[in-house]
Image: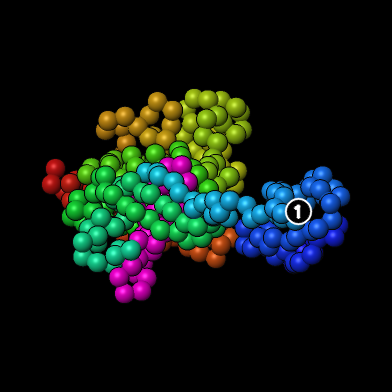
């Protein structure tokens, strides 16, 4: 409540939009708007003389409207959970607004279920009264990958694992590079070998995004930039062949597809894939997952097993 001074009678109340709405009156001919503090809310009233009585009028109704928050962005579905009888809370990784949740009306129904599958790309319109609210999504499918993903076990495990990695990012914090890399990784799941390589590279990118990137450009011991084939398990820095050979049993191997200029077509082996998953898995566990009381997801283990079995079948057929 605010009590008007300078001979003004009555009380002036505040509303949710912090605008004074009462109309106090004054019959003091010396009373003027200039007598008020220019920074006060009362100073913003319109002063009008009506029959010798000075009256403060209400401001325009438009000034009391709360303008809703709204944005449009591209997004990738990470997960869905039912909310109530027919709605669903959808989690997206968006290009410009980061990992973001919203309520989709009718999201639990049969009509929208095919679109709200993890790995699908959508065009999202998000609206809320205030920025900190959950808000509502209006979604339109742009690239529906679910049919392809569900056709193979490695893709199903891979999409689930990628979603669990994306959830390590802080909510509503944009990570455009990660979004673009996730999109490329999802598009490469048709080829199981390329899918494995892209997933390893995505795990490396997540380490960098979370502040634990590995230095694989020069040797941690000598500064050399060529013939880097090892990684220090302590510092995460690359080690050259010359510096690392005496300690090879204590070092991690750097896969050929992570070396500069390496990993072209058929430029990697099954051992490279195993070394890559061992490398990223070790640092993810130490720096990111264990401090949060977590471990590697079952989906990651399932993806690695699916890739290993597929490569074994291919090798035996040859």
Task: Work out whether 308 lies above or below 1.
Answer: above
Residue toward you, 1 or 238: 1
Q: Residue furthest bottom?
A: 85
Magenta span: chief secondary structure: strand
Q: Is residue 129 left or right of residue 25?
A: left
Q: Which residues are magenta?
A: 75-104
Regarding residue 279, the answer to whether it shows in the image is no
Q: At 43% across and 32% down in the image, what residue appears?
A: 259
Residue of label 1: 52
Residue toward you, 248 or 182: 182
Q: At 66% across and 60% down in the image, what residue appears?
A: 21
Task: Work out whether 73 lies above or below 89.
Answer: above
Query: Per the image, is 201 magenta?
Result: no
Task: Rate crowding at label 1 as few (under 14), some (14 to 19) or many (20 or more) other CA atoms within 10 Å.
Answer: few
Q: Quadrant of residue 26?
A: bottom right
Q: Quadrant of the C terminus?
A: top left
Q: Residue furthest left?
A: 317
Q: At 51% across and 51% down in the image, what residue appears?
A: 67
Q: Quadrant of the N terminus?
A: bottom right
Q: Where is residue 66 drawn, in percent x and y?
A: 54, 55
Q: Where is residue 267 drawn, in percent x and y?
A: 31, 32
Residue toward you, 272 or 110: 110
Query: Per the image, is 101 magenta?
Result: yes
Label 1 element class: loop
Q: Where is residue 162 drawn, in percent x and y?
A: 38, 52
Q: Is residue 223 left or right of residue 3?
A: left
């Amino acid at each position: 409540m605010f009590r008007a001074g300078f001979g003004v009678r009555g009380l002036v109340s505040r509303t949710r939009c912090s605008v004074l709405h009462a109309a106090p009156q004054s019959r003091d001919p010396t009373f003027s708007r200039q007598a008020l503090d220019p920074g006060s809310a009362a100073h913003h009233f319109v002063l009008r003389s009506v029959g010798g009585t000075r009256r403060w009028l209400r401001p325009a109704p438009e000034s009391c409207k709360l303008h809703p928050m709204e944005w449009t962005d591209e997004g990738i579905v990470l997960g869905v959970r039912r909310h109530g009888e027919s709605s669903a809370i959808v989690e997206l990784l968006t290009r410009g607004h980061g990992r973001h949740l919203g309520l989709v009306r009718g999201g639990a129904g049969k009509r929208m279920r095919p679109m709200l599958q993890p790995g699908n790309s959508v065009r999202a319109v998000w609206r809320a009264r205030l920025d900190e609210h959950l808000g509502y999504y209006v979604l339109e499918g742009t690239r529906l990958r679910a049919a392809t993903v569900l056709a193979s076990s490695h893709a199903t495990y891979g999409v689930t694992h990628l979603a669990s990695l994306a959830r390590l990012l802080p909510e509503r914090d944009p990570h455009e590079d990660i979004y673009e890399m996730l999109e490329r990784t999802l598009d490469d799941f048709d080829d199981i070998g390329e899918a494995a390589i892209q997933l390893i590279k995505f795990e490396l990118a997540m380490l960098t995004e979370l502040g634990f990137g590995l230095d694989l450009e020069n040797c941690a011991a000598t500064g050399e930039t060529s013939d880097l084939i090892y990684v220090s398990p302590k510092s995460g820095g690359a080690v050259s062949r010359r510096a690392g050979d005496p300690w090879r049993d204590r070092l991690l191997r750097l896969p050929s597809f992570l070396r500069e200029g390496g990993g072209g077509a058929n430029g990697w082996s099954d051992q490279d894939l195993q070394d890559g998953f061992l490398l990223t898995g070790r640092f993810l566990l130490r720096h990111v997952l264990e401090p949060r009381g977590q471990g590697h997801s079952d989906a990651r283990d399932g993806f690695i097993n699916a890739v290993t079995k597929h490569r074994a079948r291919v090798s035996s057929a040859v």
